[in-house]
Image (tube, rainbow, N blue to C red):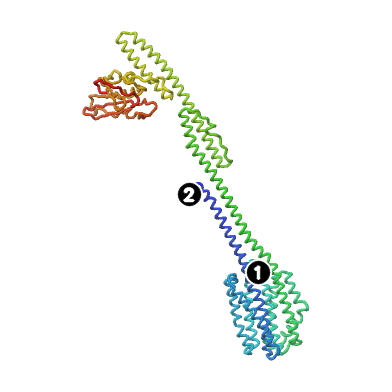
Amino acid sequence: MRFRGKSIRRKIVALLLVPLVSLTAIWAFATILTGRAAGDLFNVSSVVEKIGYPTEDTVRVIQQERRQSLVYLADPRAADGLTDLRRSRAASDEAVARIRKNAENPDVRDAMGQATDGRVSAVLDAFDGLQSLRRSVEDGTVSRAQALDLYNHLVDPCYVLLSNLHVVDNVEMDKQYRALVNLARAREFLSREDALLGSSLIVGKLTRDESRDVSDLVAQRTLLYDINLPLLPSSERGHFERFWKNAASAPLRVAEQAAVSTTSGTPRNVTAQTWNTAAGAVLTKLGTLDDQANDRYQDRVRPVAIGVILKAAIAGVLGLIALLFSIFLSVRIGRGLIRDLRQLRLDAHEASGVRLPSVMRRLSVGEVVDVETEVPRLEYDRNEIGDVGQALNTLQRAAVEAAVKQAELRSGVSEVFVNLARRSQVLLHKQLTLLDTMERRTEDTDELADLFRLDHLTTRMRRHAEGLVILSGAAPSRQWRKPVQLMDIVRAAVAEVEDYERISRSAGCLGSPSPVPPSRTSPTWWPNSWRTPRCSRRRTPPSRFWGSGSPTASPWRSTTAVSAWRPTHSWTPISDSPRPPSSNSPTPTASASSWSAGSPSGRTSASPSSPPRTAAPRPSCSSPTPC
């Protein structure tokens, strides 16, 4: 993943967003797992309370109805047989109605899973056949064995439902729960034995099949106890073991042994009264033991359930708190990084775009720059970003110090050049004074011509010395405070031209005063206009006013054809010369130039001109020469 063209803020946000998203995903996953376990726990608790306990109660009342039905089939003419049967049926109807009502509750339906819902439907479907079974019993259309088998089919789905309820997500607790359900089923086998053997004793005869069925029921009950008691804690297991070994269950065991050993007829020393007493006492005690075992199981499973809820709470609440703290910490760290980087960027922009250019401009105009004031030493945090900022500050200080030193060096060199130029000017001024004295004193024409040429060379040397002063950044020594005549300006300019012999002035109005003499620039234009093949013709610069200015022209007219040489090479110094400043400049001493070529005779002319405000207003003139 690449973030081209993105800001550092987005990159830092993306960098911090990855662990936050991962942490959020982990927190959501852990919360879902623990929350699902806690939700399942609450759902199972609701199902056990609304379906499980009513189912156990229904099984017990159906056991009573089953026994009363078999007793009624054994002796329909008993005085209280039908009354007891209908009483037990009313209790069964009430228990079944409670289950149906709870099963139709939407909350209970939502709490049950698909498998549990199917098992509850199977239990209710089995209860739907209870009315037809009761009519068959009253009509006497079923035998005792058939009625026993049909009632057993009503009870079996109930134990299937109870054994498959997943109470808590703990292996040990789940084993104990299933062991308690199987112990309740062992009591169911004793109840079946009680119904079968009690009805047979009323009849007064125990058949071979009934004796075999009693033996099977005793064996199944014993097997369930042997398998499931070891799954319970030792204290819980001891209650059942002590009961089956003490004298309270002895009459039942004796009667069962007599019934199993009887192949046909009445068991010895076993009557209906003794059996009802022994079996009733054991069934009541086993029911009490089962209820107490269930209560103790609830006590054992409660810490496990609380642990599951606590895990869900810790994963949800504490995980959320940790996530929010991570977000807060990430935002704080991200803002700190962004703030440091933004400050570093602002310092870099200020250094490159404000401080250094300002220092360079001030140094260029000759101002004194204090490094400590312009680039103070900045303090940064002791980290990587702070190291970069410190390095940037050090680099900026080094650059400013180097620039100041270079400016000082240039100033020193300029002072040396100015000093040399001033000394040269003094010597040249003395030399000009001496030459002027010699020119006034001599009368020899040849000697005077040589002195004039020497004077001209000295004058040009003085102009070059002034140029060196100007290039060194100092003001020229020759300045005029009062207006001078334009003729004097032209004469001074011509005097500093190398081929001054080739220049002649035409008559014109050159008497107007000029506040700033352009003699410093005219000598530059006129020599350029004569940088052509040597010609012996003289040049006459006519003087005429253009607009409000006072230009002087120095055209070059030659009989040499333009094709014989390249004018652009000869006029390059003029074309490459800098443009003159505007007329609003405080020292309008520059001049403008123009040149033209392509005339019929192939002649070329150059016209240096002074700005309009260089000279004073043009005076009225009656000269025949155009002004």
Can you tell which of label 1 and label 2 is closer to the viewer? Answer: 2
> Residue 195 at what x, y percent from top left?
69, 84
Image quarter in which the C terminus is found: top left
Task: Look at the picture and state if 1 lies above or below 605.
Answer: below
Residue 148 in view: yes
Left/right placement of residue 107 relative to residue 555 reads right
Q: Nearer the viewer, residue 319 or 548?
A: 548
User: What secondary structure is found at the residue carrying circle 1?
Assistant: helix
> Residue 502 at what x, y percent from top left?
28, 19
Left/right placement of residue 486 relative to residue 132 reads left
The label number, if any, that marks residue 174 in the structure image? 1
> Residue 616 at what x, y percent from top left?
34, 23
Could you tell me how far apart the alpha carbons at marks 1 and 2 are, in whole angstroms? 55 Å
Residue ID at (33%, 25%): 610
The label number, if any, that marks residue 3 in the structure image? 2
Residue density around tag 1, few if under 14, some if 14–19, many if 20 or more, within 10 Å: some
Residue 263 in view: no
Q: Place residue 520 in its image quadrant.
A: top left
